[in-house]
Amino acid sequence: MTSVELSGKVALVTGASRGIGYGVAEAFVARGDRVCVTGRNEDALKEAVDRLGADRVIGIAGKAHDETHQAAAVERVMETFGRVDYLVNNAGTNPVFGPMADLDLGVARKVFETNVISALGFAQRTWHAWQKENGGAIVNIASVAGIAPSPFIGAYGVSKAAMINLTAQLAHEFAPGVRVNAIAPAVVKTKFAAALYEGREAEAAAGYPLGRLGVPSDIGGAAAFLTSDQSDWITGQTLVVDGGVFLNAGIG
């Protein structure tokens, strides 16, 4: 992977020590980008950097909703690489499983702080640090749960609906130099989503016309496309990457 010719471009991917974020970072490294990955667990982040290639990847540990961490991450990218062409807001949380009627409002605030406000914070910082004057692209990782209701993960779904709207708003404000799009995955096989399929994967995948659940590289490929020249006339859109599950009017 490290033998690929460098593209000259730099990406910041949040929540990328594993799962979807790691799949996105892997796709960027494979095409020659230099990448900064963030995550809460310093040891897991170091392992991710080593796997991706420490010669072109750096890791910065911290919580996505922490403004000090946001500032430090963008500052470190600029100090190390001198630019930040692409931002992928992947960091997210879903600490509760149950009906909205019984949702603790403190938990709801935490979900929105991590899933929505942090994305805005990183977007603001990359905009002012580089993209305002030099252009680039932002990709927000949303969810099909932000498009249609999904049982027992209501707070997560509502936060992802907000992220989809945030995507459109930023696309309007950051044009023409910066394109902003979102990806809405269905169930992707990660530790984060394990409760949705673990022990019943065949049953969970039965509703998917393509016959399987997603894997992180599916989302990595979509993010690579949305930050490439091939998508130069696409902004403000949400790309549904769901194995066709919406064709059956379900989420899995």
Image (tube, rainbow, N blue to C red):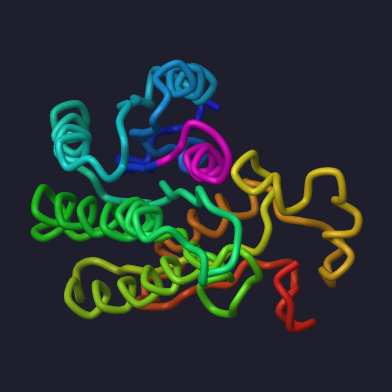
For the C terminus, the quadrant is bottom right
In the image: residue 99, left or right of residue 233: right
Q: Quadrant of residue 174?
A: bottom left
Residue 122 lies, with reference to residue 230, above or below; the image says above
Q: Which segment is the magenta one?
A: 15-27
Whether residue 144 is visible here, answered yes or no, is yes
Residue 70's spot in the image, x, y percent?
A: 20, 41
Looking at the rendered structure, the number of numbered marks drawn on it comes to 0
Residue 203 lies, with reference to residue 181, above or below; the image says above
Whether residue 139 is visible here, answered yes or no, is no
Residue 177 lies, with reference to residue 21, above or below; the image says below
Residue 246's spot in the image, x, y percent?
A: 71, 79
Residue 250's spot in the image, x, y percent?
A: 74, 77
Q: Quadrant of residue 42?
A: top left
Is residue 18 on the magenta stretch? Answer: yes
Residue, x 47% and y 39% (percent of image)? 25
Q: 113 or 70, which is in the foreground?
A: 113
